[in-house]
Image: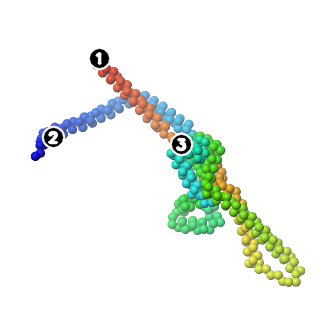
Amino acid sequence: MSTKVPQSQEDQEIDLLQISKKIGGFFESLKTSIFNGIQFFVRNWIIVLVLVVAGFSIGWYLDFSKKIYDNRIIVTPNFGSVDYLYSKIDLLQAKIASGDTVFLKNVVGISDPKAIREIEIKPVADVYKFIEDKEQNFELIKLMAEVGEVKKVLEDNITSKNYTFHTISFVSNKTIDEKDVVTPLLKYLNSSVYFSKLQKIGYKNLEKQITQNDTIIAQINAVLDGFSSTRKNTSRNDKLVYYNENTQLDDIIKTKQYLINEQGNNKLKLIRFDKTVKDVNSTLNINSIKKISSINKFTLPVVFILIFIFIHLFSKFYRNELLKSKQTHS
């Protein structure tokens, strides 16, 4: 048998009435607090205005005096090291974002890692260099452009990573010296054992190819010199010498021209093949207009006003407690 007594309708009405009064009292106290807050700012509007102006001025000065610098290094990754280079830069950015100064100092070798704020890498878009003497690249651009916008195709990661040059950009909060940041950074990027072996083999192979091409060009020159000498002696020779100039001789001349062009390109490659990630140029300490943190002029006025309100409330609390203490002891 249940021992619970049903609550009467009158008791329920009393409970609802009490809840209604509490809600009404809450809103009344809220309106009173809002009104008191408005009165506080009206009474102290001069002080509040001074605090806002002072906070904004000090914050603006701090933002303006906090200079940052843009730094750029143009590099060319060799021996298929593009993805390796991008992954290394992503790793460095993650270490900078997490504040891992130990890694940046001990592993990378940057003497003052706190000076580096962020780092990224982007390709230098040069579609003409991309398709120069590379018919397959030109056909690839045409094929990809058929299924999308040309601009998107050129900026796509698959395409852009095959550009010759790439820009490593990093931001510093002070001027830096090349030997303190750029030199250790490039040394770190070229520290891969695998790509170091590829670089040594690739460099030797290119030197051998240049030597071999020089030998073939010398042999072609000897053949052409022999042909020229034979032509001069043809009128004094009893035998008829026949040369198919439209086939064999023409092919020899074209081969020589091709080898000469290839030698020019190979000697240019030789300059940048001494490193896996070859630095082309660096531009440092460009005073940047943008600010990493430019919110002091907005936050300081709010902080000053909050401090003023806290002091006012603390003073009011202290006076009330002091008055209660005097009344208790009187």
The amino acid type of the residue labelled 3 equals Lys
Q: Give the CA distance from mark 3 to mark 2.
A: 63 Å
Residue at numbered disc 3: 291
Query: How busy is the neighbourhood of tag 1: few (under 14 within 10 Å), some, or many (20 plus)?
Result: few
In percent of width and height, residue 232 lies at 86, 76
Between label 1 and label 3, give the one nearer the viewer. Answer: 1
The amino acid type of the residue labelled 2 equals Gln
Residue 60 image label: none
227 vs 302, nearest the viewer: 227
Q: Is residue 130 left or right of residue 250?
A: left
Residue at numbered disc 1: 329
In percent of width and height, residue 311 lies at 40, 27
Among numbered discs 2 and 1, the one appearing first in the sequence: 2
Residue at image point 71% right, 65% down: 209
1 vs 245, nearest the viewer: 1
Residue at numbered disc 2: 12
Q: Quadrant of residue 274?
A: bottom right
In percent of width and height, residue 81 lies at 60, 58
- The answer to whether one can see residue 70 in this image is no
Between label 2 and label 1, give the one nearer the viewer. Answer: 1
Task: Looking at this view, name the residue that lies furthest to the right.
Answer: 236
Is 240 located above or below residue 313 in the figure? below
Q: Give the CA distance from mark 1 to mark 3.
A: 59 Å
Q: Is residue 165 left or right of residue 245?
A: left
Residue at image point 67% right, 60% down: 201
Query: How busy is the neighbourhood of tag 2: few (under 14 within 10 Å), some, or many (20 plus)?
Result: few
Q: Quadrant of residue 165?
A: bottom right
Among numbered discs 3 and 2, the one appearing first in the sequence: 2
Which SS class for mark 2? helix
Q: Quadrant of the C terminus?
A: top left
